[in-house]
Image (spheres, helix red, strand yellow):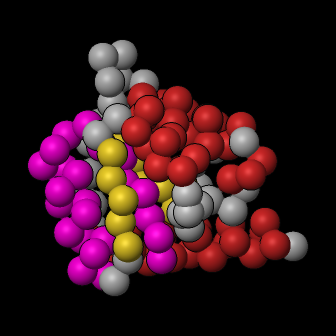
Amino acid sequence: MDVIAVDDDAAGLELLTMVLESAGHRVRTSADVAGGLRLIADGPAPAAVVTDLLMGVDRDGGYRLISKIRADPAHDSVAVVALTGVTSADDLVRARAAGADACLSKPIDVAAFLTILIEVSSARSRSAAG
């Protein structure tokens, strides 16, 4: 599966890339929202985007990225998994409201993360095709 990973923390992005690649996924990465959006626009369209929520100076980058993906009907088939190191009920509600298919706390349970990624990607793909 083609996955775009977005995280402004270099170590976190490297770890996420290793996890995804070790599971056989093709990964393109960006350290910011603008770069993530460019990767999506330049194609090919990914099956999923995995993004940190608290990015950028205002710490709202992940929410903006999710909202921009969901605002474009051309990306209806793209699943979005949000990751956050600071989990509050508000974070989870905001991520879902922005359009995330799943929101997971860091550090992630790798097996659960990979299962959820496949599940939400499959569901998005079926929904967009139907």
Q: Residue furthest right?
A: 130
Seen from the viewer's position, the closer of residues 127 and 88 is: 127
130 vs 25, left or right, is right
Q: Is residue 8 magenta?
A: yes
Could you tell me which quadrant the C terminus lies in?
bottom right
The residue shown at (35%, 66%) is: 27
37 left or right, relative to 6: right
Q: Nearer the viewer, residue 52 or 45?
A: 45
Q: Nearer the viewer, residue 109 or 81?
A: 81
Q: Residue at image x 78%, y 68%?
A: 127
21 lies above or below 66: below
One can see residue 52 in this view = yes
Percent x, y of residue 28: 36, 59
* Residue 95 shows up from this direction: no
Give the vertical position of 67 relative to 73 (above or below). above
The residue sitting at the top extreme is: 58
Q: Residue at x 81, y 72 (%)?
A: 129
In the visual, does 3 lie left or right of 12?
right
Image location (x, y in percent) of residue 45: 59, 61
Residues rendered magenta in the picture: 1-23
Q: Residue at x 67, y 43 (%)?
A: 70
Q: Is residue 14 left or right of residue 36?
A: left
**Number of marks in picture:** 0
Depth order, front residue of 73/89: 73
Q: Residue furthest left?
A: 11
Does the magenta portion include 73? no
Position of residue 122 measured from the top left corner of the image (x, y, whole percent): 63, 76
Q: On the image, which quarter does residue 123 sit in?
A: bottom right
